[in-house]
Amino acid sequence: MSTQFSWPVPGGTRTSHNFRCKCPKHIGSDNGNGHPGVDIAAPEGRDIIAVADGIISAIENNIVGFQEKSYGNYIEIEHTTNGVKNGLKTRYCHCVYKSVLGEKGGKVVKNQRIAKVGNSGNSQDAHLHFEVHKNNTLVDPYLYVSPNS
């Protein structure tokens, strides 16, 4: 499937290659049997951008340090096409404390900076945990993004 989505961390490198790979238990996973998204390594503080236009549907910006079973600081965006929700939602997790920009209900545009790569929540090193949902079902993010986009 081709996509118009941008890569969420310019210069970031994918570190998990397979959606739902075997990995340690993680929030949203299948009890340790699957990974609900992909991880993109980048230095702490690197910009995270919105992959497409949308509306902020959820935000957390006050988590400091490690917290088990937590996405840490995150932002979730419901994407739109010509201002109409299109059933796609993206989630950007483990962001730096107080780096998430905007508020619930706020609009974002493609390639707008929305946060900074961090290590908050259930995380062992700076990276972005990135998820794509289609009609409220987790889907393989690589159907929509690639490091070359």
Image: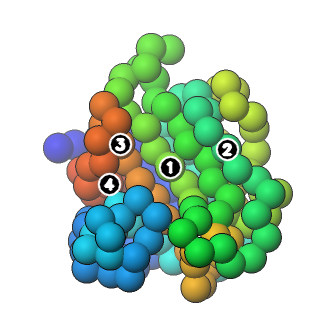
For image coordinates 35% across by 65% down, the residue present is 29
Image location of residue 134, percent across then percent down: 30, 37
- Disc 1 marks which residue? 91
Q: Residue at 40%, 76% (x, y): give it.
A: 25
What kind of colouring is applied to the model shown?
Answer: rainbow
The image shows residue 49, relative to residue 40, as above or below, that is above
**Tag 3 near tag 1, CB within 8 Å:** yes
Residue of label 3: 133
User: Which residue reaches farthest front?
Assistant: 31
| Amino acid type at mark 2 | Ile
Mark 4 touching mark 1, by CB under 8 A? Answer: no
Q: Amino acid at mark 3?
A: His
Q: CA distance from mark 2 to mark 3?
A: 16 Å
Q: Quadrant of the N terminus?
A: top left
Q: Earlier in the sequence, mark 3 or mark 1?
A: 1
Residue 113 in view in this figure: no
Residue 77's label in the rendered image is: none
The residue singled out by tag 2 in the image is 59
